Image (cartoon, rainbow, N blue to C red):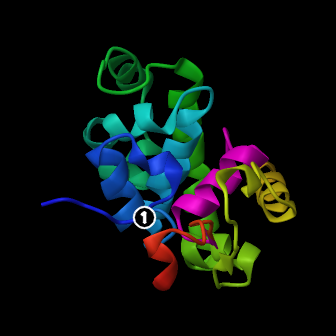
Amino acid sequence: MEDNKSRCGWSLKDQLYKDYHDNEWGIPLHDDTRLFEMLNLEGAQAGLSWYTVLTKRENYRKAFDNWDAQKIARYTDKKVEKLLQDPGIIRNKLKVAATISNAKAFLAVQKEFGSFDKYIWQFVDHKPVIHHFKTLSEVPPKSPISDAMSKDLLKRGFKFVGSTICYAYMQATGMVNDHLTTCFKRSKK
């Protein structure tokens, strides 16, 4: 069966990308565990392609206890060494350490706000920002909102959360809808 759907140009590489584009990217996400996962995966992507991270996503879930922040916050040096030997993830010491720091900061945010969802969505007034870009070149790498998010996350102890990473995170979790106006996903909320 031929797929003639008009998609955002970045998603045409293969079926993995198409599935991610069609079923996740730009769809509002409110589950704390998934929000935590995406924040760490976006950070893991720093300096690499999103495709590299996406192909390792299931390995990340296994390696990081299905993104259970309670468990990750208690990781020992021994566990870190094991992770750094795992070929299924990006074996960068700073990124692995950041995930542990992020788990601790995430738990503190949950305690303060009741949920990470409530905290993170406040940056967009708890509703998606919908853009109307016609071409990929119009999509910005960051925004004043991602600048503010990055600054606040860093202040709270999160790592690998620069403004560009935060903007990609906002796109991935549906906080901003950057599906191009020609994309079939524009007809859906």
Instruction: Say which of 42 and 61 sits in front.
Output: 42
Which quadrant of the figure contains the N terminus?
A: bottom left
Q: Tag 1: residue type?
A: Ser
Instruction: Say which of 116 and 188 sits in front.
Output: 188
Measuring from the top left, give residue 57's x and y in whole percent: 33, 41
Q: In this view, does 181 lie above or below 170?
A: below
Q: Which residue is drawn at 49% across and 43% down?
A: 41
Q: Residue at x 53, y 59 (%)?
A: 172
Are there few (<14), some (14-19), or many (20+) residues within 10 Å of tag 1?
few
Left or right, residue 124 beside residue 63: right
Q: Which residue is drawn at 55% across and 51% down?
A: 39
Left or right, residue 21 beside residue 153: left
Instruction: Say which of 140 and 27 sits in front.
Output: 140
Could you tell me if residue 103 is visible in this image? no
Measuring from the top left, give residue 93's x and y in whole percent: 53, 19
Residue matched to label 1: 6
Residue at the far left: name it: 1
Q: What element carries label 1?
A: loop
In which quarter of the view is residue 121 placed? bottom right
Instruction: Say which of 18 and 118 sits in front.
Output: 18
* Highlighted magenta segment, given as a residue range: 156-176
